[in-house]
Amino acid sequence: MAPLYPLTTYGKVKFFYYCASFTLWFCCFCRFLILLPLVGRRFLPGGMADFFHVVSALPLIGNVLNMQSSGWRGSSFYWSYFNSLKMIALCYLVIFPHPKIAKHTSYSFLISSWSVSNIIHTAYYAFKTKTRTSPQFLFWLKYHHFYVTFPLGHLAEMVLLFLSLIFVEDDSWFELILKGILLSYIPIGYFYWGHLKNKKKKKYDKIMEKRVHDKTSNPPGST
């Protein structure tokens, strides 16, 4: 079992945030898994949307907390901030004003992808904050889940944006903005996919290569 390290006040706040966020995202996903077979996707938003949209604001709080320690540096920070703002905008500027689009299957995919990715993210950093390490399976999930969750979530977001155009006034400034955002999803997705693969290579692949190298260089029983 990994040792538990004493935390500063700031560390305790971060640890509480990760534990609370994990709990809320896990509850959100469980609620989704229970309601979907009971009421179907068309009636799912009635028992799910308000809770899901509130929980979707949590990543922004996490970014503000992390900014206190890491500051405005690194591409990961900017991507993380961008994604957290995008989640809030999609929930409250696209889905909330046009609730009918939440009855589409893509909304279920959105809930699944966001919930799973944030459950893994918050669980991983809760362990890292308290023990300075994490279980091997969680370490693997942290840098591999995007192969499924990112395409699923990205496509769901695009579909919901496209569906929202039906309810927007023709030739309005909001329609032009939505169309511009929808078109930007293709290059943004391409660059973010590259960022995720580079992050995996740097944070996971190189560490695993080093571990393998250390084991082969110093096998058990060697002196």
Image (cartoon, rainbow, N blue to C red):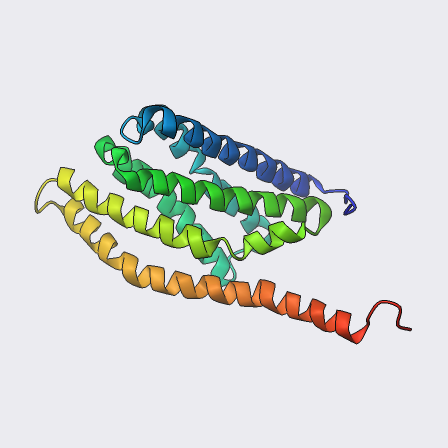
In percent of width and height, residue 110 lies at 36, 42
In percent of width and height, residue 31 lies at 45, 28
Q: Measured along the vertical axis of the image, is residue 104 above or below residue 131?
A: above
Where residue 151 sits, quadrant-wise, is bottom left
Q: Nearer the viewer, residue 140 or 172?
A: 140
In percent of width and height, residue 191 lies at 38, 65
Q: Is residue 75 visible?
A: yes
Residue reaching furthest to the front: 37
Q: Nearer the viewer, residue 181 or 74?
A: 181
Where residue 9 sits, quadrant-wise, is top right
Where residue 223 sits, quadrant-wise, is bottom right
Q: Measured along the vertical axis of the image, is residue 79 above or below residue 102?
A: below
Residue reaching furthest to the bottom: 217
In percent of width and height, residue 169 lies at 10, 40
77 horizontally vs 53: left or right: right
- Of the 4 image quadrants, the one containing the N terminus is top right
Q: Measured along the vertical axis of the image, is residue 35 above or below residue 117?
A: above
